[in-house]
Image (cartoon, rainbow, N blue to C red):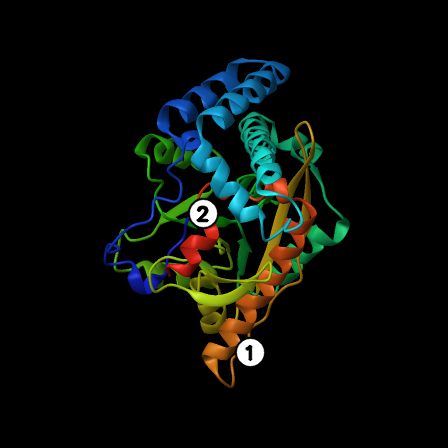
Amino acid sequence: MNESVAPDTADRPPAAPTRWTTHGLNNGLIFGLTVFGVRHLPRVVSYAIGHVGCWIAWRLMPETNAAIASNLAAVLPQESDAVRRRRALDVYRSYARDTIDFLRALASPPERMHELFEAPPDVMARFHGLLAEGRGIILVTGHYGNWEMGSLTVRMLDLPMTVVAMAEANPIVNSIRLELRERLGVETMEVRQSLETPLKLRRVLAENRVLALLMDRHLDRDRVEVQLLGRRAWFLRTPALMAFMTGAPLLPCFIERIGPGRFRISNGEPIRIARDGDREANIRAAAQEMADQLSARVRMRPELWYHFYRYWDAQEQA
């Protein structure tokens, strides 16, 4: 899942698009070579190349290092900026390992899919229990952990899933990501491509599917104010709005790497939006609940929080 946008902005381009995903780790050449290498090299060799490659990136991208350090100030205020800049290398390496493990997992046969994940029994039961209500599920997460592994989770559970995403800034990266999701049988809905986007989103939920969105980056008017890690931020409003309109529950989900090729699935508490009273107040309350659950995860594993630009500066400019 990558950047998502609101239905009410689907028919117009942003005045000044923010290229949040334009950084040295997300260009077509590096991503394409990573996909090729992971498919043909042993895991240990891929890890070694990623380990060294991230050190080189860390040495060559001081501005990105500074951005990550600035972001982590909200999580680790007691640390100096220099220490947080060194932590940027941990973030790069964590991101690389997540990417390698996801690409390798694509080759796993369905009968071995469960070996990739550690999940308490209630995780499976919660998905099926919410779908039994017949309103679909709005699966929400942030740029934390390995959100792309969520596609494999749904494949393991044999659940119908639609990812709502904005196209990647790099067309090569975007093409590869679409191909990977297609191989998993996951539908990708690229927003800002059609005036019918709002109807399509409601249709997905009416068909009792899982609708997956990243919520921690806003776009233009599609935003709702929250407190994240003790600071003001703007989250995507669309997920909460769709939950209000359809009655579908928001289900926070976080996927964290716990070892080579192994991940832990953690569902947060389902968020249900009251459909009476003040609509905007109810939407803000739901978004804040998601922000609180994401904050708790980031505080536990800050190296899994993947924003490679100055996140807080972007919030102040909103």
Of the two numbered discs 1 and 2 on the same chain, state the one appearing first in sequence: 1
Badge 2 crowding class, 10 Å Cα cut-off, few under 14, some 14 to 19, many 20 or more, is some
- Of residues 128 and 180, the one nearer the viewer is 180
Residue 44, numbered label:
none
Q: Quadrant of residue 9?
A: bottom left
Residue drawn at (46%, 23%) of the image: 35
Task: Name the image quarter holding residue 13.
Answer: bottom left
> What residue did someone put label 2 on?
310
In the image shown, does 17 or 276 lie closer to the viewer?
17
The residue shown at (48%, 73%) is 244
Q: Residue 52: where, in percent of width, then height?
A: 56, 18
Q: In this view, does 192 lie to the left or right of 250?
A: left
**Front in this rendered view, residue 58 or 14:** 58
Q: Mark 1 points at which residue?
A: 274
Q: Is mark 2 on a helix, strand or loop?
A: loop
Residue 10 position in % (x across, y down): 29, 58
